[in-house]
Amino acid sequence: MATSQLVSMLIMLLLTISGKLFSRPCAFHYALKGCVIRTGTMRYHYWLLLATLPVAADTLYQWQDETGTVHYSDRPAPPDPAALPTRSASLVPSPGPVPARPPAPLFGYRLRLPPPSSSPGMPGLLVFSAELEPRPASFRLQLWLDGQPVAQAENNTQMTLNRPPPGDYHAVVKLLGKDGKLLAESKAITFSLHRTQAEQAAHSAP
């Protein structure tokens, strides 16, 4: 340890003792306790120590702790925890709930079934021509009458029924994928089938 440090420690020890002595009652009380201390002598020692401080350290700091004890050091007093500036916690806004996106349509196909038409060259043959947009590269259409599949077409929108019995029908067409999964379904249509006298005669002829 350097000589200047030893001298500094000795000076601080003496100053601490002197500070404690100054903080005690007057000389009259010390006399009662058998400790006669002359105030003039203590003051002389105090100023003598202060005069020798520049030799040991460039700067001397003095502070008093919470118990009333006076401290001397070449370092400043430790900061008071109560006086330290408190850093306010920055409030980070919590992310709000992510708005739910509207559900996208499962498939973007538009399928429509117009009323059927008869074939001029083939009496009794009904032709169903579905309207599909857009057309997949590979698809299958099914024609349903009164809840039952009656015809289908591969990669084609036209289906036929040969001589269905007369009556009222509810028809829908369904679009199926390669794996048979339902991709789209048209609205149901209703049509009535009536046979003419000639068709009935041709149908009943042997």
Image (tube, rainbow, N blue to C red):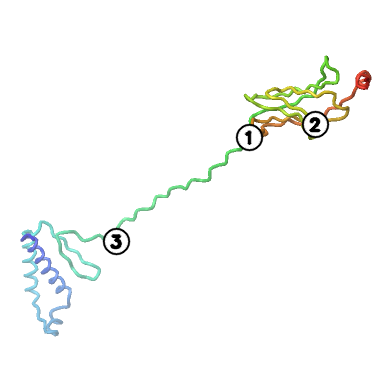
Q: Is residue 104 above or below residue 61?
A: above
Foreground: 124 or 24? 124
Asked where in the image residue 35 lies, by quadrant, the reply is: bottom left
Which quadrant: the N terminus? bottom left
Query: Label 2: which residue?
Result: 145
Residue 53 point in image, percent of width and height? 8, 61
Query: Label 1: which residue?
Result: 106
Q: Amino acid at mark 3?
A: Pro
Asked where in the image residue 178 lies, by quadrant, the reply is: top right
Q: Amino acid at mark 1?
A: Leu
In-image side of 125 versus 38 (left or right): right
Foreground: 59 or 167? 167
Foreground: 152 or 129? 152
CA separation, marks 2 and 3?
88 Å
Foreground: 128 or 54? 128
In-image side of 47 versus 114 (left or right): left
Q: Is residue 21 above or below residue 54?
A: below
Query: Label 3: which residue?
Result: 81
Label whose residue precedes the other's in the sequence (1 or 3): 3
Asked where in the image residue 74 lies, by quadrant, the reply is: bottom left
Q: Which is more foreground, mark 1 or mark 3?
A: 1
Q: Residues within 10 Å of mark 2 (few under 14, many from 20)?
A: some
